[in-house]
Image (cartoon, helix red, strand yellow):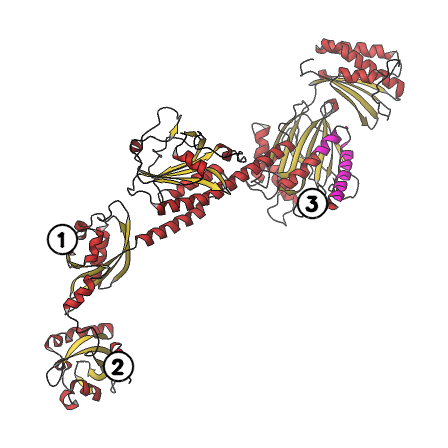
Amino acid sequence: MGTDEEQDLARQRFDVADAAPLLLDAQGVVTNWTRDARRLLDYTASEVVGTPVAGLLATEDAARVPEVAERCRRDGGWAGLLTARHKDGHQVRVMVRITPAVGTGGGAHWLVLLSDMAGARGWDMSRAVLEQMVTGSPVGIAVVDANLRCVWSNAALERFGGGSPGERLGRRLAEIQPGLDSEGIEAQMRRVLETGQPVVGYEHVGHVRSAPLRETAHMMSFTRLEDDNGHPMGVYYTVVDITERHRARQRLALLDRAGEQIGRSLDIVRTAQELADVAVPGCADFVCVDLLEWVLRGAEPPAGPLSPAEAVPLRRAGHQSVNPGVPEAVVEIGAVAHYLPGSPPIRCLATGLSWREERLDPLAREWATDLPGDRTATFLELGLHTVMVVPIRARGVTLGVTTFFRRRRQEPFDEDDLSLAEDLVSRAAVCVDNARRYARERNAALVLQRSLLPHRLPEQDAVEVAACYRPADELTGLGGDWYDLIPLSGARVALVVGEVPGHGIDAAAAMGRLRTAVRTLAALDLPPEEVLAHLDDLAALTGREEGGDPDTPEDVDVQVAGSGCVYVVYDPVDGQCTMAAAGHPAPAVVMPDGTVTFVNLPQGPPLGVGGRPFEAVELALAEGSMLALHTDGLLAREADDRPVDADRERLRRALERIASSLDLRCRAVVDALIPDRPDDDVALLMARTKLLGADQVADWDLPADPAVVADARKEAARQLTEWGLEELAFTTELVVSELVTNAIRHAEGPIRLRLIRERALICEVSDGGATAPHLRHPRTTDEGGRGLLLVSQFTQRWGTRFVPEGKVIWAEQSLTDPPD
């Protein structure tokens, strides 16, 4: 079969081709003997067949036959070493394998394979040789008896502490290594003793006597030792130090957790706190995160480097401790920590390099100063004994420092700990800087939004108003929906709600342009349908200009074409309300009795897309009626096939709910219909109408006769006396005289004078003319042309508005502003 070496190797591997087979019956009697078996033991078939197999074994192994038979029946076979008797009397060491076989009669038989182990290496080794192998092994090895007391150990186990092999004899593990979980380890030993199943790769962490301050990890394996009869004698176990592997695994797990838990939001303080939360207790017992002031403001870094000799104030953004309440912190979250010049945190800020101290001076005090009260304490009082300071750096800029301390764990920080801390901080630094950049951009966006939406709706006496705005883009708070209230002449107000396509800053910019245009057109006192017609022209023109601009980025959508708007004018003198809409939902009206209706308002096309002309409707509103102007986001459908009437019904029910104030009612409507994170921007403007009292309005019909001017002045002066406004009599008589004279000279049709007392004293003169007067600047030699110039100089504002019957020239004098 080849060389002797190959045959030896084959025998060691128990090659079936080299094994000598024989057959036994169920009682262990030899029923078949082969030539290979005769060649191995020299017995003939007639000498062996019909005799028990135990007669072929040495005395000590013959006694094991019942046990082997039992194992065969239980396990379906057996393999092991036995000693057979050669015919000439010498002993032959054989490897035996027994497997079940079926005889010709169907009875149970056993096939036995015998392999000569005489040529196998290692089986003739002496005990001294074997002991030399285990004693010199670099793996810690020990044997305990059935009572778990040490009966033998090798020299390699000494490096873990606990004494020499002789000193360990007769002692339990708790006596040898009190810093380990001896109960858990001995529980594994008992399990092996009871079941016979080995335990491989059992890991535990603790403190051994050779390194009492350092947490170490070990991997152990346990195997039961049996006597020749298979009875348990004890446990053989091995110990391997896997501390480095264990710490590497911990570091990877900590970094993985940091990747999951740090930076889950774009809030700077929350991100700093997440860093502290992740680092405790995996890396340190107490961690504090301090950031520079400009970082928390979302500002850009100041020019010039920091000096380690300067006292740089840092603000505590986060801290965490293994102890409840973070008793080690001498600076509260949000408070300023004035670190001493030259202290480690300031040096790390200035240099951008980490710093580590294995043993802190226990009598040294915290590096922070100017703390409220007497909060300074020594490191000994705080229980802190080792420290690392790591600068928070991102994109080449230092944002702050993170300080790591240990209190419970007695081992000092080493280079591996510093490397782990730097990895943690570097990951968090990017998140902090992203949050800072986001805060900067969001602050800029909010400034833009505040500049586009009214900070506070103007005070006036026509309506009581409340507004609620909820953008779809919750990160920036920007959207394309808007609302406005614009005071008009004659104590009237314009209520406007609109929206532009899209979300975010682009939509907000487009909305700002549209809102500015609406306010400009409102100043012209145009009817609602004409305001929308001018807006439509502007949107179409803007769309054409933007469509031809090659410098506009492809991902920027600032178009106002397709925008919607509803424009409402309310007059508190007579309660008349005029409105028009361009691709926008009609307002809802809540009557004083609580009944909710929707205005039957003709829908014009969206702005800038062209189509039929805009139409206006006029309706009279009782005092106390409530107008609800909203964008279509308030009627967000739960399903595409949901009918509009169903959405209106939801709005109706929400508007019918009573609240203690209009502000609360407005917010309650939005909360009832819109989730916290809407898919579309939402704006709701609610206005409760008021009527001016009869004692606030006075009017007179005047004939087109110059002689009536004096009578008009007298009537106006009398009315001012009745209102207690005698101090305005001179100016008012001048305004009345000039406006009435101008109407008689240059206009036609009926002339009417009206005084309105609201927040301003309003003087109006209406006539049937369609030509607006113009302010002139006469020369010193001119005899006339100074009337409107005087009016403009003596009143707060003046203007002209056109009505179906002609025009109205008006002038206002403030009743709320102090006189010049």
Give the x, y percent position of residue 776.
Answer: 84, 20
- Residue drawn at point x = 30 percent, y = 55 percent: 242
Say what secondary structure mark 2 lies in: helix
Please indicate whether residue 752 sits to the left or right of residue 600 in the image: right
Can residue 615 be seen?
no
Seen in the picture, residue 194 relative to 50 is either above or below; the reply is above
Residue at image position (65%, 40%) is: 507
**For marks 1 and 3 on the same chain, the one whose residue lies earlier in the sequence:** 1
Q: Secondary structure at mark 3?
A: loop
Amino acid, disc 2: Gln
Q: Are marks 2 and 1 in contact (CB under 8 Å)?
A: no
Look at label 3 and name its amino acid. Answer: Thr
For residue 482, the mark is: none
User: In the shown orientation, is residue 775 left or right of residue 109?
Assistant: right
Q: Is residue 522 above or below residue 41?
A: above
Q: Which residues are magenta?
A: 516-545
Mark 2 or mark 3, which is nearer the start of the sequence? 2
Specify whether residue 8 is in view: yes
Residue at disc 1, secondary structure: helix
Label 2 or label 1, whichever comes before in sequence order: 2
Q: Which residue is mark 2?
A: 7
Q: Which residue is mark 3?
A: 552
Q: Quadrant of residue 684?
A: top right
Which residue does the numbered mark 1 point to in the structure image? 167
Along the viewing direction, whichever of 269 and 630 lies nearer the viewer = 269
Query: Mark 1 near mark 3, Cβ–Cβ under 8 Å?
Result: no
State left or right for residue 320 relative to residue 63.
Answer: right
At a point 81% along the width and 27% down the height, the residue shown is: 803
CA gap, disc 1 to disc 3?
85 Å
- The image quadrant of residue 100 is bottom left
Location of residue 811 in the rendering, given as x and y in whole percent from the top left corner? 77, 19
Residue type pointed to by label 1:
Glu
